[in-house]
Amino acid sequence: MVKRIVHLFFAVIGVVLGYTFAPDLFVRVFHLASVPFRSPWFGAALGGAIFILTTTWLVNYVTTLIRWIEDKLQKTPLADILGGTIGMVIGLLVAYLFTPAIREIPVVGLSVQFFVSILLAYLGLRIGFTKREDLVSLFAGKLVSKERDRDKKQNYKNGEAKLLDTSVIIDGRIADLVQTGFLDGVLIIPAFVLQELQHIADSSDVLKRNRGRRGLDVLNRIQKELKVKVQIVETDFDDIQEVDSKLVRLAKHMNGKVVTNDFNLNKVCELQGVAVLNINDLANALKPIVLPGEELNVQVIKDGKEYNQGVAYLDDGTMIVIEGGREYIGGKLDVLVTSVLQTSAGRMIFAKPKLLEKAL
């Protein structure tokens, strides 16, 4: 189809040129004054035929060039095409405004006008391509908020934005984690999370109020003491009431990761396909590995949920459930590890008294 259009283009050019110039050419140059040669229609037919025959070799090159441009345009994002086109049109309009003044230049006025038009069109194309988002937003009639402008300046990469939820802020370990340098990128604090934190800090319940104030102190430390980018995002979703659901949607919108220690939010993020960084998972990964068959010396603190069970804890807080350990509550006991259960909620170790193993 493209090849036929190119053939038709050259044929039309030949017909127009033959219709316009052929009669004078035959009469004045070749001195052919007979009726057929003086007819513009004869010149049009002859010019079209000559152009079709003489440009046959050129058609393939033009067709290849058109298909190459088409392939490039198909691979180029629409915003890039629109931005470049708008910029080029603006450049040509500016060149048109300067045309009367440039034409007044003696001798080289026409050449300078052509050069200036090409230069301004190129500059407009490059500027339009670079500022494509701003141009497309401007011509689409959209008002870009200041917060959105700040997001563009940050130029987030995939996974660079880390969205903090309320639980991880109150927990406080996020500040120590950032200080060590293991968590980089941009820390995003949604306005609705900050609002929930302030609501907790103003609670009439003493425990909740202390937790809320602790969270605010953690945020203050991160912003003032630690060398990390912190940004408060005002984006909200009025159609959603739950803070966790808002956080998941915002993470999808920003293509970021949710930082939390909430087990339920962790599962929701996994179901929604949102990347999540669970502080508890990190803490569990850093705990010493205990394998079945190892011996531990622990102090039995209390009884377990099942009959005759005792409960002890490691120094890092890992719970040890001891079968038959109830009678040793309040004392120290050598135990053998039988199994280890690892979940996002934490690690649990099952063991039995070493004395019982020797008796068997």
Image (tube, grey):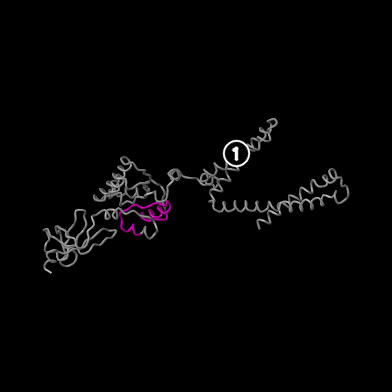
Residue at far right of view = 34
Provide residue 191's location: percent of width, then percent of height. Answer: 37, 48
User: Is residue 320 rendered to the left or right of residue 118?
Assistant: left
* Quarter of the image that includes the N terminus: bottom right
Give the amino acid type for the residue marked by disc 1 in the picture: Leu
* Residue 251 in the image: above or below residue 97: below
User: Is residue 85 rendered to the left or right of residue 356?
Assistant: right
Residue plotted at (36% across, 50% down): 163
Q: 310 or 72: nearer the eye?
A: 72
Q: Which residue is mark 1?
A: 120
- Residues rendered magenta in the picture: 238-267
In magenta stretch: residue 4:
no
Provide residue 86's location: percent of width, then percent of height. Answer: 58, 45
Q: 103 or 271: nearer the eye?
A: 103
Residue plotted at (78% across, 50% down): 47
* Residue 103 in the image: above or below residue 28: above
Provide residue 274's location: percent of width, then percent of height. Answer: 39, 56
* Residue 29 in the image: above or below residue 9: above
Provide residue 66's location: percent of width, then percent of height. Answer: 62, 52
User: Is residue 88 rendered to the left or right of residue 294?
Assistant: right
Q: 178 or 198: nearer the eye?
A: 178
* Residue 109 in the image: above or below residue 257: above
Residue plotted at (18% across, 66% down): 306
Residue at far front of view = 57
Residue plotted at (66% across, 33% down): 102
